Image (cartoon, rainbow, N blue to C red):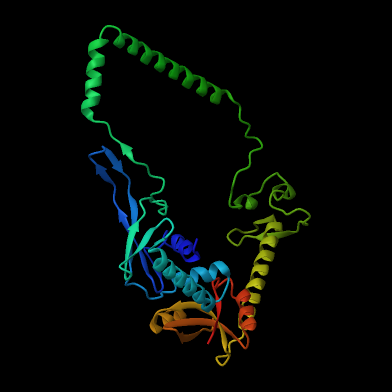
């Protein structure tokens, strides 16, 4: 299958419009649940598709999907998309039709006009694909069956049904009593149960030793150190408190602060020279105002704007070579996971 068609099928599950540059756009239309009186069936909500040959401008959605899937630069992905679209046009001119996967079929009418026939299936709708049609039976038919049953079995059916209903109720009652007896007769030991707390019990005098109180929160192999805590709210009040967990908490906070400082240092070491021929693009926007708003919302990061091919691309690093610009992507991966290299 054409790669562009596969990406279009994937993108249409999350977007209402996917543009195939130079060919047209696939549009999504939601349909509500409906009732078919001729078949006496309630159809669930679904989606249908249409095609607009006038929407041919490249909005970057399809090209970005190809670039992400192949881990290639945006310009390379754009050339791949252009080649695939040319192949699709040649297929239309040769065969007169082109299947767009599960979306539908394109037809070339009179060698100029594109016509689209949507697929009947709604498999590309995650919200609706599990819903089934509901078959309805006329109420008159049910009433007729009940009348025949009442008239033909008036003497035997009712006593038998009544007996079955009583037997079912008695059996259900016995099962419920048996289950309750089993639950209530099962002993539960609470002497060794552990309860969650906020650690306030550490400040209450107890006959249990300090080492026994802290055995549940001290790490294996960690030594216990004691301090004396003086409470200012009470005169001559003191309590010996185990600080093993507190020490572990301080070490974790220091490690996190060290990691954050290292990350800031790594970001500050990213190369950013406006004269470099290559840059690491982190966003591609339609207008310069959108690009500037994007920059204003990013804190602690030097960013620039590159106007190219009718788009305004925000970049966070540069390089004298493509490899040098790509090397900054690993450092900025946490903040900009979809960054790609572009030549100015």
Which of the two residues, 292 or 268, is positioned nearer the viewer here? Answer: 292
Residue at (32, 56) in percent of width and height? 30
Q: Position of residue 310 (x, y in %)?
A: 41, 83
Q: Position of residue 84 (x, y in %)?
A: 48, 70
Which of the two residues, 326 or 46, is positioned nearer the viewer here? Answer: 46
Q: Position of residue 120 (x, y in %)?
A: 35, 51
Q: Position of residue 55 (x, y in %)?
A: 34, 72
Asked whether residue 297 appears in the rendered view, the answer is no
Residue at (68, 57) in percent of width and height? 245
| Residue found at the far top of this picture | 155
| Residue found at the far bottom of this picture | 275
Asked whether residue 315 appears in the rendered view, the answer is yes
Residue at (60, 52) in percent of width and height? 200
Instruction: Indicate whether 217 appears above or below 294.
Output: above
The image quadrant that residue 183 belongs to is: top right
Side (left or right) of 267 relative to 102: right
Question: Count the marks: how many?
Answer: 0
Side (left or right) of 180 relative to 264: left
The image quadrant that residue 207 belongs to is: top right
Instruction: Indicate whether 202 appears above or below 301.
Output: above
Residue at (47, 64) in percent of width and height? 7
């Amino acid at each position: 299958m054409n790669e562009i068609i596969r990406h279009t099928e994937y993108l249409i599950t999350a977007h209402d419009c996917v543009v195939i540059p130079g060919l047209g756009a696939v549009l999504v239309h939601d349909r509500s649940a409906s009732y078919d009186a001729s078949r006496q069936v309630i159809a669930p909500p679904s989606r249908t598709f249409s095609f607009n040959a006038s929407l041919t401008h490249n909005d970057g959605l399809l090209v970005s999907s190809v670039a992400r899937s192949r881990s290639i630069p945006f310009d390379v992905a754009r050339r791949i998309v252009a080649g695939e679209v040319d192949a699709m046009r040649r297929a239309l001119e040769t065969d007169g039709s082109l299947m767009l996967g599960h979306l539908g079929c394109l037809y070339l009418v009179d060698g100029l006009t594109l016509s689209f026939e949507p697929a009947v299936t709604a498999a590309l709708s995650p919200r609706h694909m599990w819903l089934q049609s509901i078959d309805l039976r006329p109420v008159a038919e049910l009433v007729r069956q009940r009348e025949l049953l009442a008239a033909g079995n008036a003497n035997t059916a009712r006593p038998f049904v009544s007996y079955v209903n009583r037997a079912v109720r008695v059996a259900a009652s016995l099962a419920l009593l048996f289950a309750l007896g089993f639950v209530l007769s099962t002993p539960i030991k609470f002497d060794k149960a552990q309860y969650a707390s906020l650690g306030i019990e550490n400040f209450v005098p107890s006959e249990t030793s300090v080492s026994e109180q802290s055995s549940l929160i001290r790490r294996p192999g960690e030594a216990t150190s004691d301090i004396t805590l003086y409470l200012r709210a009470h005169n001559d009040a003191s309590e010996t408190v185990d600080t093993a967990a507190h020490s572990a908490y301080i070490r974790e906070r220091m490690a996190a602060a060290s990691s954050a400082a290292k990350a800031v240092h790594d970001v500050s070491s990213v190369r950013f020279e406006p004269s470099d021929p290559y840059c690491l693009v982190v966003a591609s926007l339609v207008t310069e105002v959108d690009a500037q708003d994007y920059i204003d919302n990013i804190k602690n990061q030097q960013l620039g704007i590159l106007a190219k091919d009718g788009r305004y691309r925000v970049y966070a690093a540069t390089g004298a070579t493509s490899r040098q610009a790509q090397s900054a992507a690993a450092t900025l991966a946490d903040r900009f996971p979809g960054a790609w290299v572009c030549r100015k």
